[in-house]
């Protein structure tokens, strides 16, 4: 025995074998020699206890109720002698309730008893109570066992009987009583693991919990051990291998803890022979630095001792026979980029741990909605790693939430101290990572340091291109495999592509490793060049992806593009490479609605452009990026027009039809928003001619889209419908990968068709197309495009009189516009909200808000919807009894429409003028009638069935008031009778009601 202890001491970091054993047993010591003597005494006592336990007769306690019999010793519930399957938590709840029958046990007390040391929501308690009731068959045949006291707790109400018996003496196979399990520590959100790991262990006998450093493997293994303590009658041995460095001592450590005297150099055969007839749970903790010897030991014991169960923890799998790997994920964190309240944030396990540890350290943490994003961000940046979160939470008492976040920004988290009772390797994040780094080979260390150049996710192609400066591809890939196995690289499949990333804390550690300046620069250049080439090859793919899921594999790469741009345009960066990278990124920035980033880097690239690059493809793309992003963010201006024209001129000179089509579309949109509707047909025809020359189906689709909308604005609804329906016919084939656009025109075109259909007199088809456009746009994950489509839907449902639906779409559009810094669209959203207030009867507030909202629209020269808003404002003034002001506004608007060519709303403008004139004086009846007739004639000429119905309703009402009821009915019936759908919409209901009064 002394020989074993002496040999053990040679391989322990502290230099004393007995000290290591006492550490494993959870016993403190002062003098190493005393420690040796104590271990010998302890092992001898263990042998004596073991011999005594073999002759002890165990008592068995039985609780009976109804047809059930619960054996508390064996944890078995039977019903009429047939075993009832119960989950572990349901069983513990039953025992807790049976301990105090006919007595109310509070929810809090049950949570403490069944989930000791864990923070668990009441929902988990309700879930397991429900399962327990199902297992007991409560409710069937009138049986009743558990009564709920709402908001308070539960009571077991069935009559019970207790009895005791004597179980037969334990056999040698189950007599081992050497449980040395450390104290169970509190855990957050490991309910699933606490259920799954014991079940898997009991089914397979050998489970290894694998995960990154600090993720909580040891804590979970200890909790599993406590959970299974009764199942093994205390026969459980916890072996902490973290302090053992000599690989030959694995068997010796286990033998010493078992109290075996082993004389040979390999203790494994003796241990296997000893455990052959024993039933025991063996927990081998922290195996990553001893993978090979632990694998050999575990494999031998597993094969030789059929009643031994092995639970191991390691940063990499042991990869041995019988092993069942359980990957332990980090704690779930709140997602990025969402509006999260404190209430929502607290539901995430990572935040729950943060709050629990902060309070345990003395902080009075009850964060507000303002602090919720800060806490969520910290947990995300720490990747949900339990140790990292705990270390950060300890700082809150001293620095507060915001102060702790600022410290985290300064990368001080690696050195933050943790609990004094923690193992040395987990006192700081740096120590945890040092432990992992020390286990790496030289090539693995080189590759790990180079991987730190990547931000977020990366692919194997990127790794081999960037990290293979002086390392062969096979060596790089081998190092990647090993780093994944050691839990230092996280993997995630995205579609058919596997994505990789370093945890942020690991990346910060790796970036602190010093490398030569020339190597660091070469690494940055290779990184930027790779993502420039990637954008050139794959950037256009973004436009043809129809769903956000299809784009998911590219999202991680854009983080690397941003990092590369920062380096290129930073101190000692590569400006020329940065210009190329910024130009290549334009299409993707626009496709992703990253307007601010597109504007920033396009502007930076153009400023840095030298004379040799004027007229180049890079300038063409940068000018387009600047023009499109500026238009979306700030509205139309001469600078926007100049940038788009310059880009278009370069595209034409270079013969780049794809860019020509996209830029023609951008100019089309520019002049449309500026209310230059007569110019739209010119751009639509230029695009049509380009489509004929190129034969590109995507450009052809764009030409149909532009012409269809231009014809709608001019009042040719039949022509508009023809062009837009032609577009629908080729839509599924016209992928737009060859066309530069700030957003997809096709869903905007579906919305344009919805508007044309409503105007034409098909309100239900219009609603269907509007919903279809929203649904299709939602699937793309393109938020700027969706904001525009939602705004269009708001118009359609407002025209239909569906105020609730209109409000829904307007609110969503405004939120997305705000999130994407789309200033003009935000202004439109505010005007739409004011319009809805007027429609709902909040007249004065609506009129005031609409007047205020129109000011930034005029300032941004975004006049596309000014006519609609002016008409709504005039109606509000009419309802407020201010028809004079309304008439002046309508007359000015009619004059502007005649100049701009926006004729599609002229019938409605003239109808509204008639209503305002009628409110001015009853003597103006003929003038009013003339306005209505002019409006009706123009609406019929345009085939605008919906405008015609509104005017016919007003004119019929006027005719009826003067005694011509028959003529009024005939007039209105002519317009109403043309409708085949939409009879539940507001205009048709008003017309139908009037027709009934004219019978």
Image: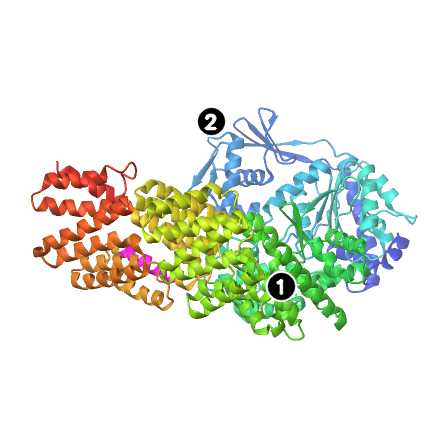
Residue 654 placed where, x, y %?
A: 58, 61
Residue 622 lies in the magenta-colored region: no
Question: In terms of image quadrants, where is residue 229?
Answer: top right
In the drawing, does residue 54 fall left or right of residue 400?
A: right
SS at mark 1 in the image? helix
The residue at which mark 1 appears reads as 391
Number of numbered tags placed on the structure image? 2
Residue at image location 74% in from the left, 63% down from the top: 449
Question: In terms of image quadrants, where is residue 631?
Answer: bottom left
SS at mark 2 in the image? helix
Residue 792 visible from this viewpoint: yes
Label 1 with label 2: CB-CB less than 8 Å: no
Can you name the residue that lies furthest to the bottom here? Answer: 571
Residue at image location 85% in from the left, 46% down from the top: 260
Residue 918 placed where, x, y %?
A: 13, 55
In the drawing, does residue 513 fall left or right of residue 381?
A: right
Q: What secondary structure characterizes most of the magenta part?
A: helix
Residue 924 drawn above or below residue 411:
above
Residue 890 placed where, x, y %?
A: 23, 60
Residue 836 lies in the magenta-colored region: yes
Question: In terms of image quadrants, where is residue 83?
Answer: top right
Give the magenta range: 826-837
Residue 427 drawn above or below residue 186:
below
- Label 1 crowd bin: few (<14), some (14–19), many (20+), radius 10 Å: many
Closer to us: 540 or 284? 540
Residue 333 placed where, x, y %?
A: 56, 55
Which of the two labelled residues, at mark 1 and mark 2, occupies the earlier sequence position? Answer: 2
Disc 1 from disc 2: Cα separation: 52 Å
| Quarter the C terminus occupies | top left
Closer to us: 963 or 367? 963
The residue at which mark 2 appears reads as 140
């Amino acid at each position: 025995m002394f020989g074993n202890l002496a040999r053990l001491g040679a391989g322990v970091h502290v230099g004393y074998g007995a000290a290591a054993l006492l550490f494993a047993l959870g016993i403190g010591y002062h003098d190493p020699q005393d420690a040796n003597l104590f271990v010998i005494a302890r092992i001898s006592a263990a042998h004596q206890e073991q011999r005594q336990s073999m002759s002890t007769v165990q008592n068995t306690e039985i609780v009976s109720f109804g047809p059930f019999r619960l054996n508390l010793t064996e944890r078995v519930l039977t019903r009429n002698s047939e075993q009832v399957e119960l989950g572990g938590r349901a069983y513990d709840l039953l025992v807790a309730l049976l301990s105090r029958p006919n007595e109310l046990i509070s929810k809090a007390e049950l949570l403490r008893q069944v989930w000791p040391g864990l923070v668990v929501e009441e929902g988990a308690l309700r879930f397991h109570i429900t399962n327990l009731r199902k297992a007991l068959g409560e409710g069937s045949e009138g049986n009743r066992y558990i009564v709920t006291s709402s908001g308070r707790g539960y009571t077991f109400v069935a009559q019970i009987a207790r009895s005791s018996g004597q179980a037969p003496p334990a056999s040698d196979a189950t007599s081992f009583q050497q449980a040395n399990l450390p104290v169970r520590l509190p855990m957050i959100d490991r309910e699933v693991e606490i259920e799954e790991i014991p079940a898997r262990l009991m089914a397979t006998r050998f489970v290894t919990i694998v995960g990154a450093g600090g993720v909580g493997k040891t804590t979970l293994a200890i909790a599993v051990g406590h959970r299974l303590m009764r199942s093994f009658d205390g026969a459980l041995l916890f072996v902490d291998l973290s302090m053992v460095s000599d690989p030959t001592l694995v068997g010796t450590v286990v033998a010493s803890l078992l109290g075996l005297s082993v004389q040979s150099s390999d203790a494994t055969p003796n241990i296997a022979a000893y455990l052959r007839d024993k039933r025991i749970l063996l927990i081998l903790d922290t195996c990553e630095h001893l993978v090979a010897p632990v694998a050999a030991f575990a494999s031998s014991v597993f094969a030789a001792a059929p009643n031994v169960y092995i639970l191991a923890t390691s940063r990499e799998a042991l990869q041995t026979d019988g092993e069942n790997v359980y990957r332990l994920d980090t704690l779930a964190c709140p997602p990025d980029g969402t509006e999260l309240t404190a209430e929502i944030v607290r539901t995430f396990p990572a935040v729950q741990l943060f709050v629990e540890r902060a309070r345990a350290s003395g902080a009075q943490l009850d964060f507000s909605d303002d602090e919720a994003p800060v806490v969520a961000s910290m947990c995300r940046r720490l990747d949900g790693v339990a140790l990292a979160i705990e270390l950060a939470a300890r700082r809150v008492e001293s620095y507060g939430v915001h102060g702790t976040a600022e410290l985290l920004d300064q990368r001080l988290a690696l050195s933050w101290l943790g609990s004094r009772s923690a193992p040395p390797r987990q006192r700081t994040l740096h120590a945890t990572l040092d432990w992992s780094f020390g286990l790496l080979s030289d090539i693995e260390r080189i590759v790990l340091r180079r991987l730190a150049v990547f931000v977020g996710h990366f692919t194997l192609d990127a790794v081999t291109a960037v990290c293979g400066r002086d390392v062969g591809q096979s060596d790089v890939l081998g190092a990647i495999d090993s780093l994944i196995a050691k839990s230092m690289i996280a993997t995630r499949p995205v579609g058919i592509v596997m994505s990789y990333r370093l945890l942020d804390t690991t990346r910060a550690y790796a970036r602190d490793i010093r490398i030569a300046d020339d190597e660091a620069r070469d690494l940055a250049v290779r990184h930027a060049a790779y993502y420039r080439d990637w954008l050139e090859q794959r950037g256009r793919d973004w436009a043809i992806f129809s769903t956000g899921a299809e784009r998911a594999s590219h999202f991680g790469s854009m983080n690397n593009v941003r990092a590369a741009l920062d380096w290129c345009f930073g101190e000692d960066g590569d400006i020329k490479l940065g210009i190329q990278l910024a130009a290549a990124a334009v299409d993707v920035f626009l496709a992703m609605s990253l307007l601010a980033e597109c504007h920033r880097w396009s502007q930076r690239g153009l400023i840095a452009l030298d004379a040799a690059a004027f007229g180049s493809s890079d300038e063409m793309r940068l000018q387009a990026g600047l023009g499109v992003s500026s238009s979306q963010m700030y509205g139309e201006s001469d600078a926007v027009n100049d940038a788009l024209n310059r880009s278009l001129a370069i595209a034409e000179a270079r013969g780049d039809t794809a860019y020509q089509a996209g830029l023609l579309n951008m100019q089309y949109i520019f002049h449309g928003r500026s209310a230059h509707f007569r110019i739209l047909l010119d751009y639509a025809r230029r695009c049509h001619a380009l489509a004929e020359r190129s034969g590109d189906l995507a450009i052809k689709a764009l030409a149909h889209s532009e012409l269809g909308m231009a014809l709608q604005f001019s009042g040719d609804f039949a022509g508009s419908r023809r062009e837009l329906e032609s577009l629908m016919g080729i839509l599924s084939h016209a992928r737009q990968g060859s066309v530069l656009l700030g957003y997809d025109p096709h869903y905007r075109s579906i919305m344009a068709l919805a508007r044309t259909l409503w105007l034409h007199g098909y309100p239900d088809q219009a609603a269907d197309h509007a919903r279809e456009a929203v649904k299709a746009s939602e699937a793309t994950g393109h938020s700027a495009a969706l904001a525009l489509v939602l705004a269009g839907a708001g118009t359609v449902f407002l025209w239909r009189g569906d105020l609730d639906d209109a409000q829904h779409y307007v609110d969503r559009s405004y939120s997305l516009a705000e999130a994407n810094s789309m200033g003009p669209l935000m202004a439109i959203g505010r005007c739409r909200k004011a319009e809805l207030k007027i429609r709902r009867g909040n007249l004065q507030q609506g009129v005031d808000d609409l007047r205020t909202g129109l000011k930034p629209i005029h300032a941004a020269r975004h006049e596309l919807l000014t006519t609609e808003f002016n008409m709504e404002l005039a109606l509000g003034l009419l309802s407020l009894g201010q028809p004079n002001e309304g008439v002046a506004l309508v007359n000015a608007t009619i004059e502007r429409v005649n100049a701009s060519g926006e004729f599609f709303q002229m019938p409605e403008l003239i109808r509204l003028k008639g209503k305002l004139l009628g409110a001015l004086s009853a003597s103006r009846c003929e003038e009013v009638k003339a306005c209505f007739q002019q409006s009706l004639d123009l609406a019929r000429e345009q085939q605008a069935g919906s405008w015609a119905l509104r005017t016919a309703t007003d004119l019929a009402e006027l005719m009826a008031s003067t005694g011509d009821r028959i003529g009024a009915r005939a007039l209105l019936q002519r317009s109403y009778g043309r409708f085949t759908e939409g009879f539940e919409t507001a205009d048709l209901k008003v017309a139908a009601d009037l027709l009934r009064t004219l019978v």
